[in-house]
Amino acid sequence: MANTILVGAQWGDEGKGKIIDFLTEKADIVVRSQGGNNAGHTVICGSTKYVLHLIPSGILRAGKACVIGNGVVIDPVALCSEIEGLREKGVEVGANLFISDCAHLVFPYHKVLDEHRDLKKGSGKIGTTKRGIGPAYGDKAARTGMRMSDLVQPELFSSKLKARLEENNSILKALGEERIDFGEVNAAYLRAGALLAPMVTNTVVYLHQALKEGREVLFEGAQGTFLDLDHGTYPYVTSSNTTAGGACTGSGVPPHRMDRVLGVMKAYTTRVGEGPFPTENEAFGGRLHAMGREFGATTGRARRCGWFDAVATRYSAMINGIDELAVTNLDGLDQLDSISICTAYTNRGRTLEVPPSDARQLAECEPVYMEMPGWKSSTEDARKFGDLPPDARNYLEKIVSLTGAKLGIVSVGAHRDQTIVL
Ligand code: IMP
Ligand code: MG
């Protein structure tokens, strides 16, 4: 496998965890380069279900190295409990995990501010995961953040934390929130720091050395294209660059070392949190929820659901330079009589082929649909493209051709073997 950037082509939760796990077999190193524990990647191996938040899904395969890159924001206490949880399930986490010394830290005040700001927005709220991601990246951009390199130097860490808490406690006080106790945070973070210290390193040097040795790297994207801070449906986005370019800045591996971009998308569309979603359809969502599908891995929230949106995914293919697509959750459509595909939007008397950048205008857009017949049978046991019912193949060929990329993988269930490679 060449060096691959894997991105979510929609609003996150495209089923990236499973595809990453599948591709990891051929990779040597798996890298997370953005986001934090707002992400939730679900991977099912045999009868065990794993939900990963900060650690690359590659950890589940023995002999693979995993990197948490400089572009990630880390809640070190949450990372330690994720490591503990994996170890309890018999997964080795230790010398196979490398954590960037430049990755920024998420603190309890980030979480309080995240929640406070979102609630204050009322009906304009973003619906964040309340993990403190936005405020942590805010501190990074404002150059008031603290990094993993601080965490592993206890004296330096404590003095910086004291100063940061002084400022943040006065903000919290003004907002009517409870103050955060230095002693408690300091102790918990230093405990986490001691546990993580052996894994903290300059991951840029590690990755470049590995590339020099010819090892192959998989960059695992978190969230999805329309949650990208620059290219998504701002302000209803997350605070990192979820698109392909984020893999370079978030890891220190330059663009010319990347060989291909794989976009992961669902055979339909989902979104969690607030923000525009032109093809949203409650009746369709109700059917998926009744099947026990589409509940969030991080927050348990029922995801909003809608039809496949070719306008959005075409744009996503362009931004990311998607060479190949992995289409997941095809089996979610198995029982439908007819399936809608959005091919364009209409807005203010015009037909649009590209999503408007303004979230309010995007929210006004009316989808233009074409209908395709459903296949009304289970695709879960298909292992080759030819095993799929003809109407399912037609549907896949249609959505992929509308997106302008090549079909590489189809997923028909959560298990490793429910994967069709073209
Ligand atoms: P934040 O990343 O917690 O700030 O949340 C901002 C927006 O991104 C909210 O709409 C979240 O629901 C959404 N979001 C964040 N992480 C994920 C994810 O991993 N999957 C899907 N949506 C996400
Ligand atoms: Mg998820």
Image: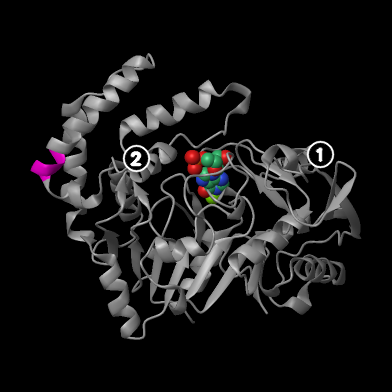
Q: Is residue 41 left or right of residue 367?
A: left
Q: Compared to 249, does 88 lie above or below? A: above
Q: Nearer the viewer, residue 218 or 377?
A: 218
| Prevailing secondary structure of the magenta residues | helix
Residue 66: give its label.
none
Q: Earlier in the sequence, mark 1 or mark 2?
A: 2
Residue 377 falls within the magenta-colored stretch: no
Find the magenta span and give its range: 154-158
Residue 26 visible in rendering: no
Q: Nearer the viewer, residue 74 or 302?
A: 74
Q: Compared to 341, does 25 lie above or below? A: below
Q: Is residue 223 left or right of residue 316?
A: left
Quarter holding residue 399: bottom right
Residue at x 82% of width, y 68% of height: 398
Residue 301: x and y in percent read: 58, 36
Residue 71 visible in rendering: yes
Residue 282: x and y in percent read: 78, 37
Say few, some or many: other residues with alpha carbon within 10 Å of mark 2 (under 14 / 14 to 19 / 20 or more): some
Q: Compared to 291, does 96 lie above or below? A: below
Q: Compared to 56, does 210 lie above or below? A: below
Q: Does the beta carbon of the residue at mark 2 sit less than 8 Å from ligand 1?
A: no
Type of amino acid at the residue the image marks with label 2: Asp
Residue at x 19% of width, y 35% of height: 161
Q: Which residue is mark 1?
A: 283
Q: Which residue is mark 2?
A: 139
Residue 306: x and y in percent read: 75, 46
Residue at x 55% of width, y 60% of height: 16
- Please state the total of marks drawn on the protein image: 2
Type of amino acid at the residue the image marks with label 1: Ala
Q: Secondary structure at mark 1?
A: helix
Q: Is residue 7 left or right of residue 341?
A: left
Q: Nearer the viewer, residue 301 or 205?
A: 205
